[in-house]
Image (tube, helix red, strand yellow):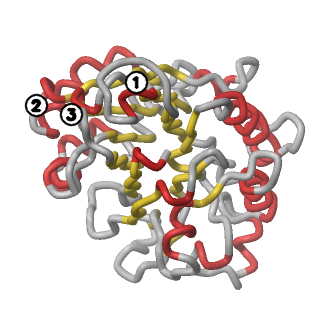
Amino acid sequence: AGAAGPGARRLRAASWNVAGLRGLLRREEGRSTLRRLVDEEGVDVLMLQETKLQESHVAEVEAALYEALGGGEAWRAAWACSTARKGYAGVSTLWRRRVGDAACRPLSVDPAHEADREGRALLWELSGASAAGGGGGGGGPRLKLINVYVPNSGADLQRLEYRTDRAAGWDARFRAAIAAQATGESRVCVCGDMNVAHEDVDFHNPAERRTLTQAGTTPEERASLRCFLAPPLGMRDAFRQVHGRAAGQYTYWSQRARARPANRGLRIDYFLLASGVPPAAVVDVQHLQEMHGSDHCPILLELDLARL
């Protein structure tokens, strides 16, 4: 599980909804998972969701996060914070400097809606030459990782229609944003909390009728995710590509219901690969269920950059 640097051919990316980054960094359990992602899993790119930071918090929290990862001299970071509501949503992408020529910026999905001011998405780009093992800009496939925290439909489903409207909903606009990035030599992977369990195997209680009206398992949300996988976008669920119909592979458990010990969970965190990413480029996908610190577990994707 080595890191990808100049001349290397592998890249390991992790995604984790931390359910409040300041709180996680105060707990030994959370700091321990961050260190394990670096020391044991060799993560090169770390994408965090639901950081719940204001922009004024970033400098202090970034310093604490770098310390937890073993030192800021090895890392770079980008942030998207909610300006619509305090202590809400937010994403951050961190990457090792030795990965190569990379840059990261916020990705706009729906500029006319308040959700665009909630810190929902970051676009990380690795130059074609760095992806190929070289040191600068240039030709070759450009790897793009989109760190996303999809809006939750809400306990009363107050955002369900906005999420799932086929023409103008957030999901539809997000699909358009992905398509705009997945052109030419770009290889796009969406990484993060999609806030929906796609198939019956992706949550523990599909036979219960109440799931039809619970955020994350409604028919509308599940159908909307299928639109990411269907033409014209035609994305692939990387976990299912590697592990088929493996059951019990959840990434979120309700803390209120104390659901994690009994593994009563949902799989709502994904790596979705645009059609330009060759299946052979996917080396492994893991749900790191033994790592704690949040009501989600980290998920891990390993890519063979030489096969992009």
Front disc: 2 or 1: 2
Q: Measured from the top left, where is residue 276 in percent x and y?
A: 63, 45
Q: Please tell me whether mark 3 sits on a helix, a strand or a loop.
A: helix
Q: Please tell me whether mark 2 sits on a helix, a strand or a loop.
A: loop
Q: Is residue 301 above or below residue 25?
A: below
**Left-right relation of 127 to 223:** left
Q: Measured from the top left, where is residue 165 in percent x and y?
A: 85, 43
* Residue 219: quarter of image: bottom right
Q: CA distance from mark 1 to mark 3?
A: 12 Å
The reply to whether residue 89 is in sight is: no
Front disc: 2 or 3: 2
- Observer-nearest residue: 134 or 170? 134
Residue at x 85%, y 34% (from the top left corner): 168
Residue that carries the numbered disc 2 in the rendered image: 71
Q: Measured from the top left, where is residue 286 in percent x and y?
A: 39, 65
Q: Amino acid at mark 2?
A: Gly
Pointer 3 local density, CA inside 10 Å: few below 14, some 14–19, many at least 20? many
Q: Please tell me whether mark 1 sits on a helix, a strand or a loop.
A: strand
- On residue 65, the disc is 3
Q: Residue furthest right?
A: 167
Q: Amino acid at mark 3?
A: Leu
Do the residues under discs 2 and 1 have CB atoms within 8 angstroms? no
- On residue 79, the disc is 1
Q: CA distance from mark 2 to mark 1?
A: 18 Å
Do the residues under discs 2 and 3 have CB atoms within 8 angstroms? no
